[in-house]
Image: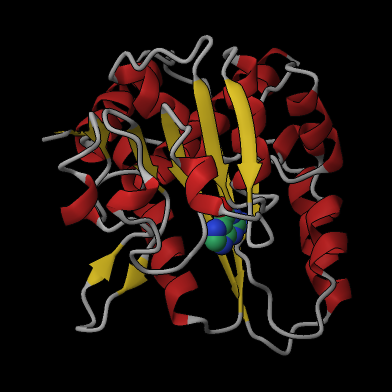
Amino acid sequence: MAQIIDGKLVSRSVREDIKKKVDAIPEGVRRPGLAVIIVGEDPASKVYVRNKKLACEEVGYLSREYALPAETSEEELLSLIDTLNADGEIDGILVQLPLPRGFDEKKVIQHISPSKDVDAFSYVNVGRITVGDADFVPCTPAGVMELLNYYNVELQGKRAVVIGRSNIVGKPQALLLLEKNATVTVAHSRTVDLPSVTREADVLVVAVGRAKFVGADMVKEGAVVIDVGMNRDENGKLCGDVDFEAVEKKASYITPVPGGVGPMTITELLKNTFTAYSRHIKE
Ligand code: GUN
């Protein structure tokens, strides 16, 4: 039976460390500040944004939320980003995705100053990750690395397989694993004979967005299985991309859903915001 990787536990531990650093900021010196922009009424996005605000409050950051109507023009949004880029109290700017139809997401994201791009979506930050010189790392893959590190999972020389090649998870995840000297394969929807590829993995990271996509037949005995998925099963219950009940019998470590990677994402956002703050406060 696999050992469960407890994302809530690791997240709590990292947030306590952040809070200690915030508590140590001298009187009269400003705290880290995060601005979150949400456009429109997407219910899932509203929940995420609320959780980001609560997390900021928990560790003592300044948190500002800008909730704009879906009819907001792109120029207005870009102008708000300009204002926040120049705002001395704000270290991190996050535009919650997806944006409503009609917005050029790429253009909006690239408008955020790279020094405040705590999602690490800007071309500068993506390039820095590629050459192993990143200030910020996208929150989900960073959270996965934090979990692997906390549970002392050896990566050097190991075979790592990432299923999924998105810009937010799969691609940066592969680069971070490579940075730790794993031998990395990125598999995706066009991969031929996926089970034969995933059965090679000592570490398997799954980010495909399909409920219980990975069964026990796709996993090597003793593999470490990280599930980035967040889906609903046929009964409406939250579940990941991995068939947890089947795979936990075969894996050495496994993340549950919920309670695995999920809790780490916002924690990594808090870490990136502190990194941005540490740089800004020296300027
Ligand atoms: N929507 C879903 N995930 C994310 C994320 O990591 N960052 C932003 N900005 N929006 C998202």
Residue 59 lies in quadrant = top left
Using the image as rendered, state which of residue 231 and residue 73 is in the foreground.
Answer: 231
* x, y percent for residue 60: 36, 35
Compared to 238, does 73 lie above or below? below
Q: Which image quarter: residue 134?
A: top right
Q: The N terminus lies in which quarter of the figure?
A: top left
Looking at the rendering, the quadrant in which ligand 1 lies is bottom right
Query: Residue 88's x, y, as percent?
Result: 70, 36
- Vertical placement of 108 versus 59: above or below? below
Q: Which residue does the image show at 76% across and 32% down from the upper left? A: 115
Q: Is residue 42 visible?
A: yes
Residue 51 location (% of width, % of height): 36, 57
Q: Which of the image's four quarters has the C terminus?
A: top right
Rendered image coloring scheme = secondary structure
Residue closest to the far bottom: 71
| Residue at the image point whose x is 85% and y is 34% from the top | 124
Q: Position of residue 183 (x, y in %)?
A: 60, 21
Residue 139 is left or right of residue 44, and the answer is right
Residue 125's place in the image compared with 266, above or below, is above
User: Is residue 65 shown to the viewer in this render?
Assistant: no
Residue 229 left/right relative to 131: left
Tell me which residue sits at (68%, 42%) in the image: 171
Q: Is 234 located above or below residue 116 in the figure? A: below
From the viewer's side, name the closer residue of 177 and 271: 177
How many labels were placed on the picture? 0
Residue in the foreground of this view, choosing between 251 and 131: 251
Residue visible at 48% across and 42% down in the picture: 198
